[in-house]
Image: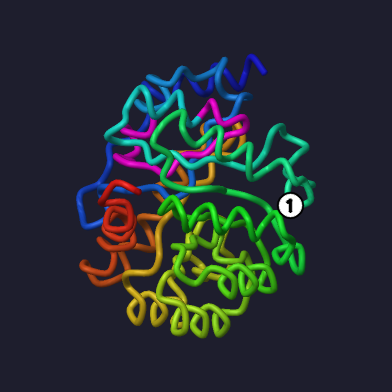
């Protein structure tokens, strides 16, 4: 743990300069500031680290939700706070069966100007449970987006129940077939794909033809993400941001600029209801 703390501290002195280009500025669609990071990175220092790697705005969620609130209060112009439906770390595995979740969310949403619900974990037919239906209804009522870590069955269920709610599919479904992504993007204008941990984007550092075509056909439907789910991922931020810029640099400038920053900026350009 002490070694990790030293690594996190040293990053502020060693982070490389951000290269110029259409992806120089990033709007990160998947940042966590969880309790296991609080005693290692203060809100101010966490935001400094994001700045050093060129992340000027970020969608932030946390377990517990206080983490997102801490970053938001430090930099409300940079942080887009999302509220997870978890009352504790282990709750991620059972929240969709807990009838208390909708009321919990209603109580917590008033703490700061939250812009969405998630990132939450869900799979398959659990997405049709009454608790999930109520959470989607709450998002629609409040004008909130939703971010889901789910499988193809789960994303279809969410889209089926709330097509009007902006839905960010975390990790692009990991290894979900690109043909499925194309089909869903064609049919659901409020679906966005976040790209952290997405498999198959590149081969030997080169953007694959199928992904180049997806990005150019749907340039306004993808967002970058680093997913700082652990202290180690905060340590790796410079490398993760550089990897994202490497494949973004292989796209036309306007497409790269949209995915790097523009799409998320447009999605969260106005205040919610």
Total residue callouts? 1
Task: Kindly indicate the quadrant of the structure image that contains residue 103.
Answer: top right
**Looking at the image, residue 149 lies above or below residue 161:** above
Observer-nearest residue: 54 or 157?
157
Instruction: Locate residue 66, reporting x and y percent.
Output: 54, 26
Q: Residue 235 versus residue 26: which sits nearer the camera?
A: 26
Q: Residue at x 46, y 28 (%)?
A: 111
The quarter in which the N terminus is drawn is top right
Q: Residues within 10 Å of mark 1 (few under 14, many from 20)?
A: many
At a point 41% along the width and 47% down the height, the residue shown is 241
Q: Is residue 144 above or below residue 206?
A: above
Q: Is residue 115 above or below residue 224?
A: above
Q: Is residue 261 left or right of residue 28?
A: left
The answer to which of 166 and 198 lies nearer the viewer is: 166
Q: Residue 13: horizontal and vertical position, in percent?
A: 36, 21
Span highlighted in magenta in the image: 49-67
Q: Look at the numbered disc 1 and give the secondary structure of its residue.
A: helix
- Please provide percent x and percent y for residue 24: 25, 49
* 211 relative position to 6: left or right: left
Which residue is denoted by mark 1 in the rendering?
96
In the image, 78: left or right of 119? left
Tell me, yes or no, whether the highlighted magenta stretch contains residue 62.
yes
Q: Where does residue 107 sit, x and y in percent of width and height? A: 56, 33
Image quarter for residue 177? bottom right
> According to the image, what is the colour scheme of the structure?
rainbow
Residue at the image position 51 percent from the left and 85 percent from the top: 183
Q: Please tell me which residue lies in front, 82 or 150.
A: 82
Quadrant for residue 216, please give it. Answer: bottom left
Q: Is residue 68 magenta?
A: no
């Amino acid at each position: 743990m002490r070694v990790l703390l030293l690594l996190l501290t040293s990053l502020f002195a060693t982070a490389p300069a951000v290269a110029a280009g259409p992806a120089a500025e990033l709007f990160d669609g998947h940042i966590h500031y969880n309790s296991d990071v609080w005693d290692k990175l203060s809100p101010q220092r966490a935001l400094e680290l994001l700045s050093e790697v060129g992340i000027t705005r970020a969608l932030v969620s946390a377990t517990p939700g206080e983490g997102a609130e801490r970053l938001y209060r430090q930099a409300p112009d940079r942080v887009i706070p999302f509220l997870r439906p978890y009352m504790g770390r282990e709750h991620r595995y059972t929240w969709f069966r807990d009838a208390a979740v909708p009321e919990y969310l209603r109580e917590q949403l008033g703490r700061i100007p939250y812009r969405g619900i998630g990132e939450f974990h869900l799979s398959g037919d659990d997405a049709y449970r009454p608790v999930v239906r109520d959470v989607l209804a709450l998002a629609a009522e409040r004008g909130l987006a939703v971010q889901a870590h789910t499988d193809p069955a789960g994303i279809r269920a969410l889209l089926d129940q709330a097509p009007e709610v902006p839905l960010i599919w975390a990790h692009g479904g990991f290894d979900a077939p690109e043909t499925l992504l194309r089909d869903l993007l064609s049919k659901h204008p409020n679906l966005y794909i976040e790209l952290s941990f997405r498999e198959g984007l590149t081969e030997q550092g080169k953007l694959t033809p199928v992904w180049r075509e997806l990005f150019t056909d749907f340039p306004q439907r993808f967002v970058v993400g680093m997913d700082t789910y652990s202290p180690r991922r905060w340590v790796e931020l410079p490398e993760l941001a550089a990897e994202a810029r490497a494949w973004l640099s292989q796209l036309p400038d306007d497409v790269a600029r949209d995915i790097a920053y523009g799409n998320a900026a447009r999605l969260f350009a106005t205040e919610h209801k």
